[in-house]
Amino acid sequence: MSRAKKKTVKSSRPARWWRIAWQTALKLLLVIVLALVVYFIYLDSKITSTFSGQKWQVPAQIYGRSLALFPGKYLTQLNLIQELEQLQYRRSTDVSGPGQFSVQGGRVTIFRRAFTYVDGEQPARLFSVEFNRTGVSRVVQQGQAIDFARLEPQLVEHLVSPHQEDRELVRLEAVPDLFKDTLLLIEDRNFYQHRGVSPLAILRAFWVNLTAGRTVQGGSTLTQQLAKNMYLTHDRTLWRKANEAFIALVLDYRFSKDQIFEAYLNEIYLGQNHATAVHGFGLASRFYFGKPLAELAPEQYALLIGIVKGPGFYDPRRFPERAQSRRDLVLRLMFEQHLLDRQAYERAVKQPLQVVPRGQYLNASFPAYMDAVKRELRQLALDSALMHSGIKVFTYLDPMAQRQAERTVSQIVPGMNPDLEAAMLVVDYQEAAIQALVGGKTAGFAGFNRALEARRPIGSLIKPAIYLEALAQRGRFTLGTMLDDSPISLRNNNEEWQPQNFDKQFHGPISLMRALADSRNLPTVRLGLQLGMPKVQEALRRLGLERRVNLYPAALLGAVDLTPYEVTQLYQTLANNGVHQSLATVQAVTDQHGAVVYQRSNIKTVRYPAEDVYLLHYAMIESTLTGTAQSLARTWPQPTFAGKTGTSSDYRDSWFAGFDQETLVTVWLGRDDNKSTGLTGGTGALRLFADYFRQKGKNNLIRYMPEQVEWQRFSTRTGLPIPEYCPNGWLLPAHKASVLQLATCE
């Protein structure tokens, strides 16, 4: 082969090699581009579907009752101020915006926040409440007296599942402009100009970090931060960073800036509440300051925004100096960029951090009451998806009543006996609404809920059911009817049963009213046997006992095991003039948009005529004046309560259930090992009942005599109705139909 030919072959080889390499590179580039296109299509489909739908699992929000204010309401000025302080209202001499109140003499002026309730959106509202000695005298708005006003309900708890994020959604339009402007200033000044990724910001951060020799500045846009928080892990890898940029581009292409900004406000991680992550500025505002975002001051905005850089590093509770330094830096930038004037800036930097204690960002922690709420929600069988979509659960919880019940139990019970346990329920008996529930002496801690689960012998608490059934037998029994208080012996299952009175004494003939007021056992046993055990069982059913219990003669003295909740259900019907309604903690449930998905039905049934219950109340009031609960009369000598003590065998259980004009309270004391407490209902449970009303305040019991009832004179010897002029008689209320024939004077 010639030399020229060889040279041509040699020169063609490199050209062919480069051509192959170029073609291969081009093909590889096409494959990469195709792969990126496919990946972008995949990301677009995935992100669009998730971002357009329900983005997060939002826990159910549990609210207490809304405090109603109207002329004649029994409420002290101090009670109202305490309620406002619990709602994190700020006391001010100049009430200029929502979340503020002032006090002038007997008048409280309130600028109530806007809120969403069962009946829809309630706008912010300015009104005044005036007080007199008996409670609220007037409610005034714009100089005019109005019939009704109310405060927003307290947010009590979020039902957060294990490992679930906690958040409280906010709408972009509800976020103050100063907060939005400051957040963009610190995190992404060009948010509304870039396309999701900012190359200049990345280069600037790279140069700053390079010159500093460490990472001191990030180049991620707000959109990239959102992409990382919503879709990616926090691994520091190039692939994760590239993915972050890809997702940010898709988000910016598919969604508006405002949609992305709102999602960021609700997604960003801002702290840790024990095992639960705090996400979003709406929840962070409550977590750190106990207030809605719209009510924060500039220095509080600055702290929240400063925390974004490192929620753990700048935790104001653990590292207050570090957090304050970061806050002051943000405030300085706000001043330099003319978001704050000099006066506002200087005032803000002088303020302390003032974060609320951990756990108090929700208004309270009431685990026993929440047990009842959760149990009721399970019975409602709501859609599981709905439970994690930010529903609002409006309950009957009265935080003031709950705290007082807890204080009463925690302060009194340990001093009685260190092994003693307790349960307590407070109920608005006219609505069968549970306002407070205590499940043990350590009320603030979750555990065995004795109010709901502990079945214990109820002792003499069963007696009103027996006596009411007797009084319902028109013409057969009256309050004056004489019962036999003498020894009795019964055989049951080849065993001899000889019940005894508490004092081991026998009074012979005794009126039905005194037998109940003094809680005499032997007359009660005879009365129950006269009625028959089926009648007693029927009485319990009519009063509201839903499960069937087997009754033996000993049950006439309370040898029947009920929970404090079940006892309260019985006494709700007794207190409410014989009108039964199932006890409830949940008033209504709304979805995240405010639409009602559950509303408690107000089904009320008359189980006993009002005139029969009136006679029973007369005897139960007497019990609190001269009977087994007469210690109440030392504090309240006038008729204030009706109630009944209860003590089980060997003093194992101490009970009291009683009520004033509005409120029914049931108290149980006992030991978990079922040993003797050494307490009767009068020396144990009654002390807690009295302390609760002494601290919380009472509303005297008033019972108007029904038309079918009249005053009648009864013989103190025979128990028969007699003419008014006869000696040895006493006046008692009675059914008109039962006194048509009068006995002669003795």
Image (tube, grey):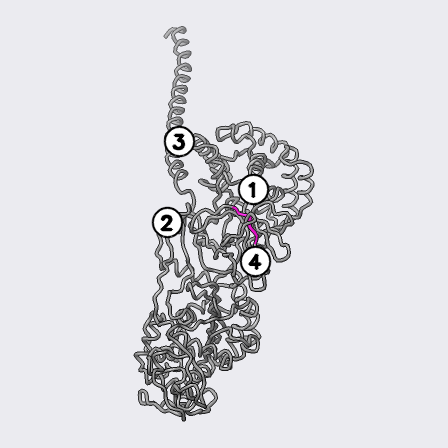
Of mark 3 and mark 4, the one earlier in the sequence is: 3
What amino acid is found at the position of numbered circle 2 in the picture?
Answer: Ala
**Could you tell which of marks 3 and 2 lies nearer the N-terminus?**
3
Mark sitting on residue 308: 1
496 w.r.t. 378: above or below: below
- Alpha carbon of mark 1 to alpha carbon of mark 4: how far? 37 Å
Q: Which dot, 1 or 4, sits closer to the camera?
A: 4
**Residue 134 place in picture, x, y as percent:** 56, 64
What is the C-alpha distance between the residues marked 1 and 3? Answer: 29 Å
The residue indicated by pointer 2 is 385
Q: Main secondary structure of the magenta part?
A: strand
- Which residue is found at the position 40% from the left and 55% from the top? 588
Of residue 725 and residue 89, the one placed in the foreground of this image is: 725
Distance in Å between CA atoms under marks 4 and 2: 38 Å
Residue 705 highlighted magenta (yes or no): no
Amino acid type of disc 3?
Phe
SS at mark 4 in the image: helix
- Region rendered in magenta: 124-128
Disc 3 + disc 4, Cβ < 8 Å: no
- Disc 3 to disc 2, how far (Cα)? 30 Å
307 sits to left or right of 266: right
**Residue 612 location (% of width, % of height):** 37, 75
Residue 637 visible in the current orientation: yes
- Residue, disc 3: 40
- Mark 4 lies on residue: 80
Q: Nearer the viewer, mark 1 or mark 3?
A: 1
Q: Earlier in the sequence, mark 1 or mark 3?
A: 3
| Residue type marked 4 | Leu
Alpha-carbon distance for marks 2 and 1? 30 Å
- Frontmost of labels 4 and 2 is 4
